[in-house]
Amino acid sequence: MTEPAAKAAAAATEAGPIRTGAEYIRSLRGRKLKVYLFGELVAEPVDHPVIRPSVNAVAETYDLALRDPELASTASPYTNGRVNRFLHIAQSPEDLVKQNKMQRRLGQLTGTCFQRCVGMDALNALHSVTFEIDGQCGTAYHERFKAFAAMAQRGNLVIGGAMTDVKGDRSKAPGAQADPDMYVHITRRTKDGIYIKGAKAHQTGCLNSHWLIVMPTIRLGPGDKDYAVVGALPVDAPGITYLYGRQSCDTRSMDGGDIDAGNARFAGQEAMIVFDDAFIPWQRVFMDGEHEFAAMLVERFTCYHRRSYVCKSGVGDVLIGAAAAIADCNGVEKASHVRDKLVEMTHLNETIYGTGISASHQATRMKSGVYLSDDMLSNVCKHHVTRLPYEIGRLAQDLAGGLMVTLPSEKDLRHPEAGAVNRAGASDCVDNIAAASSGVKPPRPTSTRTPTSRRTIFQTKCDPSTRKTMRSPASTMSRVSRRTSVDFSSGSSSEKDRKSWKPTSRAAVARIRARSRSSFTHHTNGLANAVRLRAT
Ligand SMILES: Cc1cc2nc3c(=O)[nH]c(=O)nc-3n(C[C@H](O)[C@H](O)[C@H](O)COP(=O)(O)OP(=O)(O)OC[C@H]3O[C@@H](n4cnc5c(N)ncnc54)[C@H](O)[C@@H]3O)c2cc1C
Ligand code: SF4
């Protein structure tokens, strides 16, 4: 273990776990990670304007556990105390269901990826796989793994799950690649541990983690033994370089200002990790050459992770609320096509959530005692996630109109001359955008508002501490149901509602759309990108 990682682990166990989001952010400082972004070495990732929002999103997982311990923490058999739910090994289907509920809530709170699920799902998958390798091969991985999990739980640490290799020629197995480094593999074994080389791509939250768990990415054969490696190493271990991944609209956070930065406070993070003879001590190695278990690990990990994507239904809640608020602001909230679209967005969003959470409900007990979600339903959830958020985004884009993609920059809105021209109309648009990003209903447009009062209203909407009206699924449903006269929360509608609710046929929807003044824009990416709906 490196000096800083050893210190962090010792501090975590002796001085107690990281508790708050602020403590978590402090724990990331001073690690001297080798991180490249835009062709430059980043001095302190925590302070970089592109990276910081992603740190804030993870910090929210700590603060939620304090605000709502029932939802985001639980009792662990390994520490005899409460631990963050992201580090818990599922003891029942109910534990998996609660993971999903926590993920939806965090999606609502951050409107983005909060990054801790990959590690959570890797821990749960490894619990059963290490147990079964030991049972068949006489190894001692399971006890090592449990010691590692307990250490992470005691320190309340963040774990990144490093599975996806860069792969090279996809038609060839890892051992048959022209360049052996296309898949992470063991280069040396010593009495102290192993050295690994290669790269992992698209690594969610890796810089914001304390530890990485490296895992194989595909089924392996007898010729791939050195690629059958699972191990945990600190994020700041020598021999690791990080290449930060681009996000759409990411340079907006470097533009300055506070109203035109998309989701200004929170963001996701992916980077490529390059390992150049990075060391893993034996005590942290959980697979070494047992190639026949690689497919089992990949399948179990993806089974957990594919129902973790209910996170997107939390993000969908924000988007539905934002779309409804913009319709209000534009004075079209009563139009039947607007109501139909909000209903459709809600239906699609709940479909993702419904399949994810039912996969958790139907979990089964593995030999090691951990529970694994239903594989069919988990995969159906994943299939929905690769499609439905785009349709939800398309409908939101339609309701928002063209401003989402063509609004002048904040610098123009604040310019003494250009801003004056814009003030009467465009500043109301800014209020709309603020509402969209905060999920708060904006006031009706008015040209009599002064720039100062606009700014105050705007800041109130955007400041998460005052964002009390961020919608819960229930409040989103009741809001939509109020508009559509359909009671989603109880699954039925009142007599009065039933009378006023007229289902619209597909042909009628097509006619309404054709007539609609707010015709479909070609810029279907805009709003979806703004909230970074990413289906992986
Ligand atoms: C936002 C985001 C976050 C992510 N986070 C993580 C993370 O935290 N940890 C992690 O480990 N991974 C992560 N991933 C990686 C993700 O799991 C992979 O992107 C996914 O598994 C697909 O792999 P790939 O990108 O290498 O695609 P590719 O393998 O390049 O696939 C591209 C296309 O080629 C096809 N193809 C590939 N191989 C074959 C073959 N042999 N025969 C026929 N067709 C083939 C595929 O079906 C696909 O259509 C993330 C990805 C994204 C986009
Ligand atoms: S994309 Fe969703 S499931 Fe995956 S790490 Fe991010 S928040 Fe979690």
Image (tube, helix red, strand yellow):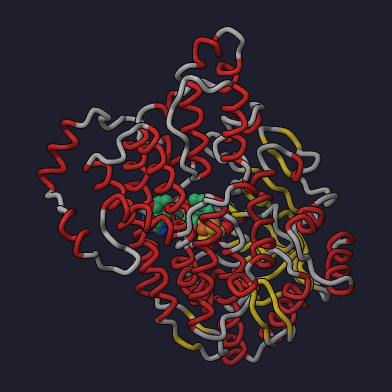
Total label count? 0
Quadrant hosting residue 23? bottom right
**Residue at coordinates 58% horizontally, 35% vertically from top-left?**
250
**Residue at coordinates 49% horizontally, 88% vertically from top-left?**
365
**Nearer to us in this view, 43 or 484:** 484
Residue 184 position (above or below residue 299): above
| Quarter of the picture holding the N terminus | bottom right
Q: Position of residue 41 (x, y in %)?
A: 76, 37
Q: Is residue 492 left or right of residue 125?
A: left
Q: Is residue 436 left or right of residue 354?
A: right
Q: Is residue 167 in view?
A: no
Q: Position of residue 241 (x, y in %)?
A: 72, 48
Quadrant hosting residue 208? bottom right
**Residue at coordinates 54% horizontally, 79% vertically from top-left?**
95
**Residue at coordinates 33% horizontally, 41% vertically from top-left?**
394
Q: Position of residue 244 (x, y in %)?
A: 64, 43
Q: Is residue 375 left or right of residue 414?
A: left
Q: Is residue 22 left or right of residue 86?
A: right
Q: Residue furthest left?
A: 507
Q: Is residue 361 in view?
A: yes
**Nearer to us in this view, 454 or 220:** 454
Q: Residue furthest top?
A: 417
Q: Position of residue 459 (x, y in %)?
A: 62, 36
